[in-house]
Amino acid sequence: MNAPERRRVGNVAFSVETLDQAIGDVIQLAGDVTETPSAGPRKSGRAVHFANAYNVALARGDVDYARLLSQGDRVFSDGVPITWVGRRAYPDVAAEWQRVYGPDVMQGILERSGEAGPRHYLLGGSPETLAALQSRISADYPAALVVGAESPPFDVPTETDLNARDARIRASGASIVWVGLGTPKQDWEVRRIANGLPVVAMAVGAAFDFLAGTKPQAPEWMQNNGLEWAFRLASEPGRLGRRYLWGNSVFLEESVRTMASIRKAPN
C-alpha cells in the first residue's frame, strides 16, 4: 500500500486523503499489522493522529511534539481550516485534501467492521462515557466487535501501569486501539502503543463523547464553515478558552508563514 502524499501546514506534515480514502487506508493498516503465518508476529504497529489548528499551534512552540506528529504514520486534517490552507498552498493535491474528522473516521470504520475485523479497543473517557459509547456501538454497529475498554485514571501512569495496559490490549486481540485522552496526551500515547504493539493506535480526541452522545456536537453547517471551535467554546468556555483563543491566533500566524514559504520556494 502506498502512503498518501504529505504536505506541511506550519510544522505539521499532513497526510492528504479524502475521508473515504482515509477510512479504507486505516482498515488496510489494521489488516497489515495483524499476525500472519507467513510473515510471523509483528512487534510494532502504526500511529494515527488527527490534527487541527490547536495541534499546529502546539507544534510551533514544542519541537518534540512537532517531531512526534511528523513521525506519525498518518496525520489527518481534523479541522476545516487546515484544508482551507492546505488546498490554497498546495493546488497539486487540492482535489484530495478533505477534512478527515476523527468522529467521522471512527463511525466509518465501525460501519465496515465485521467478524473478520477490525477488532476494537477503547482507551479513554470516563467510565460513564465508555459505557454509553459501548451501548451506542452495540446498537448502531452490531457487527463491530469491541474486545476491550478502559478508562485510565488521571494520575500519571507508572511503567508498571503501562506494561499492564499493554498486556490487556495484546491479550484482547485488538487490531485498532481508539485513544481519547485529550490533546496532546493522546498523541504521545498512540506513539507509545504503536511502538510496542501490533495495532493501529488512533488519537481521536472528543470522538468518544460525540459518538456516545455525552457532549453536543456542532451543527453540520458550523462544521462545514470552520466554526466548530465557536460552538465548542460556547459549550465549555472554562476548559477550552485558552485552546481556541490562543490556538486560533497562533494557527493564523502559522498559516500566513506557510503561504509565504510556498511563494518563496523555487519552482
Image (cartoon, rainbow, N blue to C red):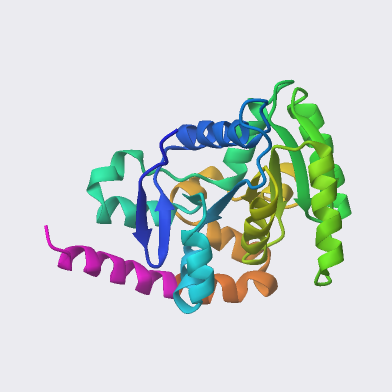
Which residue is located at x 68 percent, y 32 percent?
35
Residue 162 shown left or right of residue 253 in the figure:
right
Label total for image: 0
Q: Viewer-proximal residue, 235 or 112?
A: 112
- Where in the figure is residue 165, as x and y percent of width and height? 83, 54
What is the magenta segment's predominant secondary structure?
A: helix
Which residue is located at x 38 percent, y 51 percent?
83
Quick one: quadrant of the C terminus? bottom left
Residue 257 belongs to the span the image colors magenta: yes
Which residue is located at x 66 percent, y 60 percent?
186
- Where in the figure is residue 218, as x and y percent of width and height? 59, 50
Residue 32 visible in the current orientation: yes
* Residue 188 vertical position relative to residue 198 in the rendered view, above or below: below
Residue 234 belongs to the span the image colors magenta: no
- Where in the figure is residue 251, as x and y percent of width and height? 42, 69
Residue 1 shown left or right of residue 178 in the figure:
left
Residue 206 visible in the current orientation: no
Which range is magenta? 250-267
Quadrant in the rendering for residue 183? bottom right
- Where in the figure is residue 153, as x and y percent of width and height? 86, 64
* Residue 153 vertical position relative to residue 146 in the rendered view, above or below: below
* Residue 168 vertical position relative to residue 175 in the rendered view, above or below: below
Q: Outermost residue, left direction?
A: 267
* Residue 229 vertical position relative to residue 218 in the rendered view, above or below: below
Q: Viewer-proximal residue, 94 or 224?
A: 94
Residue 240 shown left or right of residue 152 in the figure:
left
Quadrant in the rendering for residue 125? bottom right
Which residue is located at x 69 percent, y 53 percent?
196
Residue 259 shown left or right of residue 157 in the figure:
left
Quick one: quadrant of the N terminus? top left
